[in-house]
Amino acid sequence: MAKSKSTPISTDTGRGFAGRAFQRIQGIIDDTGGQAGAPIRVLQQAQGVVGYLPPTVLKTISRDLKIPLSELHGVVTFYSFFTMLPKGRHVIQVCLGTACYVKGGQQILDLLKKDYGLEPEGITPDGKFSLEIVRCLGCCGLAPVIAIGDDIHRKVKPGQVKDILSMYH
Ligand code: FES
């Protein structure tokens, strides 16, 4: 059965980043031709375009692939590589596992909130950093530990956080 082309969801399509992003997503949806496995592939590619999967994107995919929104939510929350929240250029992971918590992980978290306005799952206004809480980064003997991207910073004292973050551009 021939699949009809999807309808733009916004009159803004074609103008600005949002419009271009939606045009690309609708192109991705149209290219699936209703094949099996399409939802995950479309979600992956849409996340590649936008950087995350906001409600408007999920609603578009739900409508055009004729998949209930609740089902898409289930997929997105099941696979850890999907995110419904925007990520910064650098993702800071603060470990609050037992060893890191006892050694001061919470103080690092408090400092990120106080000095950078970063809440868990939040992002700085310039999009440079976003923050996640993790439960163990596998190097408990060097607690407290934070990760920024692929870099692991060990035995971090709150007073070092500013210098550590200044290494990232
Ligand atoms: S508890 Fe933080 S690295 Fe294991």
Image: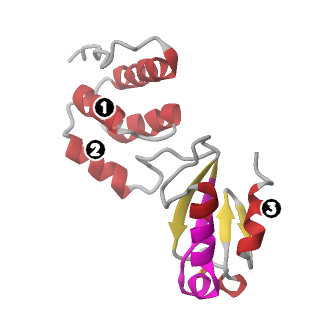
Q: Is 156 in the magenta?
A: no
For mark 3, does the 10 Å Cα neighbourhood hold few (<14), some (14 to 19), or many (20 or more) residues? few
- Residue drawn at the location 67% of the way across and 56% of the way down: 149
Quadrant where the N terminus lies? top left
| First-in-chain label (2 vs 3) | 2
Apparent side of residue 13 relative to residue 145 in the rendered image (left or right): left
- Figure quadrant, ligand 1: bottom right
- Residue drawn at the location 80% of the way across and 61% of the way down: 163
Q: Quadrant of residue 151?
A: bottom right
- Vertical position of residue 10 compared to residue 92: above or below: above
Mark seen at residue 72? 2
Apparent side of residue 167 relative to residue 148 in the rendered image (left or right): right
Foreground mark, 3 or 1? 3
Residue type, numbered disc 2 = Leu
Asked if the residues shown at circle 3 and circle 1 are in contact, with their CB atoms under 8 angstroms apart, the answer is no
Question: How many circles with numbers are drawn on the protein?
Answer: 3
Residue type, numbered disc 1 = Ile
Q: Which residue is mark 3?
A: 163
- Mark 1 secondary-structure assignment: helix
User: In the rendered structure, which segment of residues is drawn in magenta?
Assistant: 91-111
Mark seen at residue 30? none
Spatial distance from mark 2 to mark 3, Cα to Cα? Answer: 41 Å
Instruction: Tell me where residue 37 appears, x and y as whole percent.
Output: 34, 40
Residue type, numbered disc 3 = Asp
Asked if the residues shown at circle 1 and circle 2 are in contact, with their CB atoms under 8 angstroms apart, the answer is yes
Q: Which residue is mark 1?
A: 61
